[in-house]
Amino acid sequence: MRSTKSRSRNKNRNNNRPSGGNIVNRVFDSSGPDGKVRGTPQQVIEKYNQLHRDAQLSGDRVNAENFAQHAEHYTRMLAEAQREIDAKREEQEAQNRERQAERDRQQQADRERQAERDRERDERFKAQEEQSKGQVDPGSSDQPDVVEEPALVETPENTEKPKKPRAPRTRRKPAPKADAQPDAPADDAGPAEAAE
């Protein structure tokens, strides 16, 4: 298990050049005659041009030519990348123009459909107005002065039922006590009257 992981890591390390992408902003490690030069293509070109001038001033024609060739290589690479970027940009702009033209055509078609619907609605409205002109308006004819009220229909809710008179309340006799004598006559007088 461990060996496959390390193998895959080594595989990625060996392939350190990124695929695709924008070359203009990519950082390069260039191995020239005077050591490594690192930077974007524009920075590498400037560095090799500086080394070319320094070699010319020191009288080293071989190194001067070598630095000039390195600078030219990166200049061609940068120019090619710029052409590709410009071509992609033009293609994208053409697609955007095409999409915008399609949206404009769609909006124009929508406006035309809406105008047609509005015209049809106006024609229907005019036709209804002309049709209503030929008919007599019930509000404009003579109206009767007196309006008779309809007779009320008797329903259980609006009829009054005669109420029955209430029977007078009778007083309940108290239940006989167990101590009381059953033969004794009941006295109608209350306890206060009995005391007198």
Image: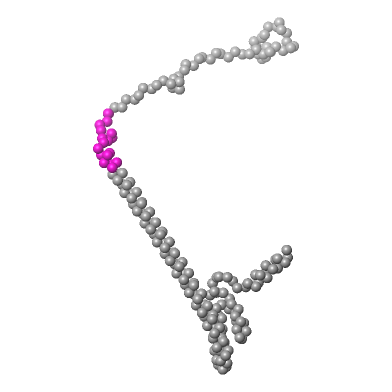
- Looking at the picture, the colour scheme in use is one colour
98 and 15: which one is in front? 15
Q: Residue at x 61, y 13 (%)?
A: 171
| Residue 55 in view of the camera | no
Q: Is residue 32 above or below residue 100?
A: below
Residue 54 place in picture, x, y as percent: 56, 90
Quadrant that contains the C terminus: top right
Magenta stretch holds residue 140: yes
Q: Is residue 2 above or below residue 147?
A: below
Q: Is residue 95 above or below residue 122?
A: below
Q: Residue at x 39, y 56 (%)?
A: 106
Quadrant in the picture for residue 134: top left
Residue 88 place in picture, x, y as percent: 48, 69
Q: Is residue 174 above or below residue 34?
A: above
Residue 144 place in picture, x, y as percent: 27, 28
Quadrant in the picture for residue 18: bottom right
189 and 7: which one is in front? 7
| Residue 30 in view of the camera | yes
123 and 2: which one is in front? 2
Quadrant that contains the N terminus: bottom right
Q: Residue at x 56, y 83 (%)?
A: 70
Residue 116 place in picture, x, y as percent: 33, 50
Magenta stretch holds residue 110: no
Magenta segment boundaries in residue numbering: 127-145
Q: Residue furthest bottom?
A: 59
Q: Residue at x 61, y 86 (%)?
A: 34
Tag count:
0
